[in-house]
Image: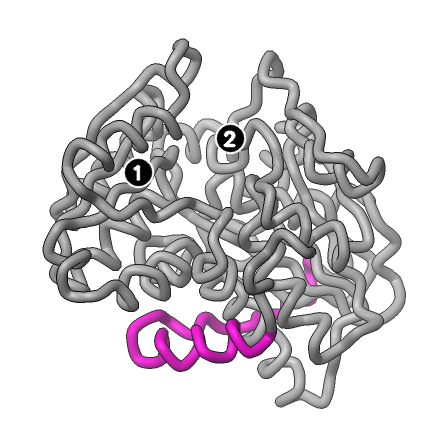
Amino acid sequence: MADIDPPVSYDDVADAARVLSGVAVRTPLLENRALNEMAGGRLFFKPEPLQVTGSFKFRGAYNHISRLDAAARKAGVIAYSSGNHAQGVAAAAFYCDTPALIVMPEDAPEVKKRGTASWGAEIVTYDRYGSEPREAIAARLAAERGLTMVRPYDDQLIMAGQGTVGLEIMEQLAEQALSPARVLVPCGGGGLTAGVATAVKHHQPDAQVYTVEPEGYDDTARSISTGVRQQADMTTSSFCDALLAPEPGRLTYQVNSQLCTGGLAVSDTEVTGAMAAAFGHLKLVLEPGGAVALAAALSGKLDLATGVSVIVLSGGNVDPALFAGNL
């Protein structure tokens, strides 16, 4: 973790919790008998679809943008995202009275484009499969307009903000005199996992933290296994649009390689089943990427029979037609 200066720490997460208090939703921790029986163990669910903008991303975005100085706030911020980080940045910028420019793929779900625009952000679209990567597009626009970049995961303040999910999990379990044996976290670039793992391992060092990714995009799992950052198979298709990062972040990988036990991969079919199960038993709408950890639990990727397992449900921003077509 030598390249992280300074490394994301539990103190960073606790400080983010203070910044977010009264702004972000302290989402509940849910349990459901039917899902326990389906998974063969005791599960608790952290439902971030109930968060501002419908995903955990608001936490990190607000933790970052709210700390900008007056000049940077006035100039504005820029982000690149397929949708959830876009909405999180747009909402955080709205609350901080800061202009926001968001670089989004042309094929991003319409519900995410509309959600981003509803907070007053300007949207610039790009071809996800084109020659100019989104990072380069955003960097060029940031330089041209004097904007502050708010990266989706490879940022200390972003990781710390997302870590408040893990901090709340530990506090909410402690209220029931419980602690987790394992935590399953949806993983794209790795910021949510890094923050959650930092908080969970601080309180419960022997807890196991697993990343969960779509098949073909399990680059973090393979990176943890091999000890070297791996690329995703970008030729593979998946409807988990929120988790299609090309590789783990440099900073997030350094954290996750130290704190995570391993990684799991799930198919679109398994994700579809998880979306239906969440809707039927928890009455929650999950987007595909938000359902991958539940998919891993219900499809037997791990033995969950002993101890308490926490399943992070990371977001619920899904186009109605896609959701209805997969139930």
Q: Is residue 167 above or below residue 47?
A: below
> In screen coordinates, is 19 left or right of 115?
right
Depth check, front residue: 304 or 208: 208
Residue found at x 60% / y 42%:
250
Q: Is residue 261 above or below residue 11?
A: above
Depth check, front residue: 231 or 86: 231
Magenta segment:
10-35
Q: Circle 1 — which element?
A: helix
Type of amino acid at the residue the image marks with label 1? Lys
> In screen coordinates, is 20 left or right of 181?
left
Expressed as whole percent of the image width and height from the top left, the position of residue 35 reads 69, 58
Expressed as whole percent of the image width and height from the top left, the position of residue 138 reads 30, 31
Magenta span contains residue 16: yes
The structure's colour scheme is: one colour
Residue neighbourhood size for the residue with mark 1, other residues' Cα within 10 Å, grouped as few (<14), some (14–19), many (≥20): many
Residue 112's disc number: 1
Q: Is residue 232 above or below residue 266?
A: above
Real-space CA distance between mark 1 and mark 2, rounded to the nearest whole angstrom? 18 Å
Residue found at x 25% / y 59%:
92
Expressed as whole percent of the image width and height from the top left, the position of residue 132 reads 37, 15
Depth check, front residue: 146 or 89: 146
Magenta span contains residue 127: no
Residue for badge 2: 326
